[in-house]
Amino acid sequence: MSEIVVSHGYGASADSVWFPYLTERLAAVGHRVTVPRLPHTEAPRLGPWRETFGDAAVAAGPAGSTVLVGHSIGGVNVLRFLEQHDPEANGVFAGVLLVATSAHEVGYDELAPFFEGGFDWERIRRSARHFRVLQAMDDPVNQPDPAEHVRLLVEGLGATAVVTPTGAHFGATPDDHVEVPEAVRLVTELLTI
């Protein structure tokens, strides 16, 4: 059994967007999915979000059989956690999937602190074996050019990207339950390579 730990996005929870679908599909083949409730989801703060997610990621089990998943600003939270993760002391994670994740600030003042100072790509890359990016070209959040976010993440992480023509932000509100088979496929891929 492998572990998958998900960092949800702004205003979300374990029952949001495609997380129930991901959990159901992966549990059916013997994996465990954890979506920790990040504090103050309507007013995210980097420190508490990073710490809460990091505690869940480390507690999940051996890093080598754990995949980290982030949706939207949750993906940025995963990156910020990996910047502070010590792979020599705590292991290298099997993989990371970033879904609809911004590579730079996109105009939400309350989320700007998550992007301050840029990313330490080298340190992040040392903390996980493989990276995947899933992005829709009609994403209304990662503007003005969703492809630019993909390019920056691919270059910074050495990631493989899957870009779809549609999908918007792959869910955006807690009651927006969608199925994202591509996310299940990519997590499964990260668990087997």
Image (tube, rainbow, N blue to C red):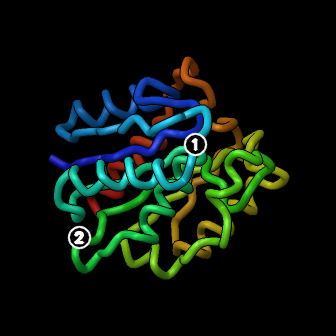
Left or right placement of residue 12 versus residue 21 in this view: right
Q: Could you tell me residue 38's position as x and y percent?
A: 44, 39
Label 2 near label 1: C-beta < 8 Å? no
Amino acid carrying mark 1 in the image: Pro
Q: Is residue 170 visible?
A: no
Q: Could you tell me residue 93's position as x and y percent?
A: 30, 65
What residue appears at the point 39 percent right and 78 percent down from the top-left corner?
Answer: 126
* Crowd around label 1: few <14 · some 14–19 · many ≥20 (10 Å): many
Judged from the image, the secondary structure of the residue bearing numbered disc 1 is: loop
Amino acid carrying mark 2 in the image: Asn
What residue appears at the point 52 percent right and 28 percent down from the top-left corner?
Answer: 17
Name the residue that disc number 2 marks.
Answer: 90
* Crowd around label 2: few <14 · some 14–19 · many ≥20 (10 Å): few
Residue 125 higher or lower than 42, as above or below: below
Left or right placement of residue 23 versus residue 132 in this view: left
Judged from the image, the secondary structure of the residue bearing numbered disc 2 is: helix
Name the residue that disc number 1 marks.
Answer: 44
Residue 79 higher or lower than 179, as above or below: below
Query: Which quadrant of the view contains residue 10?
Result: top right
